[in-house]
Structures are given as structure tokens and as C-alpha cells.
Amino acid sequence: MTRVRAVGVRINLLSFYFVGTPVTVGLAFSLGVGFDELWYGLLTAQAVALVLVLAEVLLCTDLEMEALRAKKLTNVEVVVMSEEERGAHLIGDSDDHKEGVAV
């Protein structure tokens, strides 16, 4: 199993079985609140899954490596221009048509 799939399995197990199910059972049956609380238990599980997925993406993803992989997969040559080059390019002659991406 790849790392991405393993992370997804862990997030789903944690959010739905270890958080969502106890919340649902506790609200709907132990406290006797009723059918609506079944939905609140599922909503709680979805919220936990959302937080865990965001944490995984934002904290554990090497964005520079992913950008290099995307560049390699698309075979796109990107020219990065500094602030000075961008300013000179905008002020310079209109005959100067350099290709580039300003960052």
C-alpha cells in the first residue's frame, strides 16, 4: 500500500470509527437525544476528517518537491523573473518579447 493510501485509511479509521461512531452512539442512544444526533455524529466525523486531511497536506507535504514533480510531468520550462527584471521588462522596449512567468 502506498503512503498516500495508508494516510487516507488512517484518517478514515480515526475520524469515522474512533471519533464519529462513539459520538453518534453517545448522542443518539446513551443520552437518548434521538435520530437527529445520528447526523451530528457523522458531521463530527466529517469535520475531524477535514482537519486531519488539511493537517496532512499543509504540514507533511513537501511543496517544492511536488512543484518539481509537476514541472517534470508537464515538461514545461518556466522562467522566473526577479523584481528588477520584471520592472525592466515592463519599462523596456515593446520590441523585447521575452517569454517568462513573473512570480
Image: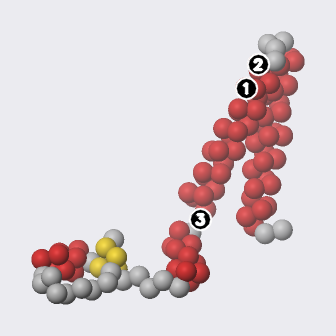
**Image quarter (top left, top right, bottom left or bottom right) of the C terminus:** bottom left
At a point 74% along the width and 58% down the height, the residue shown is 7
Instruction: Answer yes or no: is residue 11 visible.
Output: yes
Mark before the other along the chain sequence, 1 or 3? 1
Q: Which mark is residue 36?
A: 2
Q: In the image, is residue 82 above or below residue 98?
A: above
Q: Secondary structure at mark 1?
A: helix
Q: Position of residue 58 (x, y in %)?
A: 56, 57
Q: Position of residue 23 (x, y in %)?
A: 78, 28
1 and 3 marks in contact (CB < 8 Å): no
Residue 43 occupies which quadrant of the picture? top right
Q: Residue furthest front?
A: 95
Name the residue beneath numbered marker 1: 40
At a point 84% along the width and 40% down the height, the residue shown is 17
Instruction: Answer yes or no: is residue 84 visible.
Output: no
Q: Nearer the viewer, mark 2 or mark 3?
A: 2
| Colour style of the rendered protein structure | secondary structure
Q: Which mark is residue 61?
A: 3
**Image quarter (top left, top right, bottom left or bottom right) of the N terminus:** bottom right
2 and 1 marks in contact (CB < 8 Å): yes
Q: Secondary structure at mark 2?
A: helix
Identity of the amino acid at label 1? Tyr
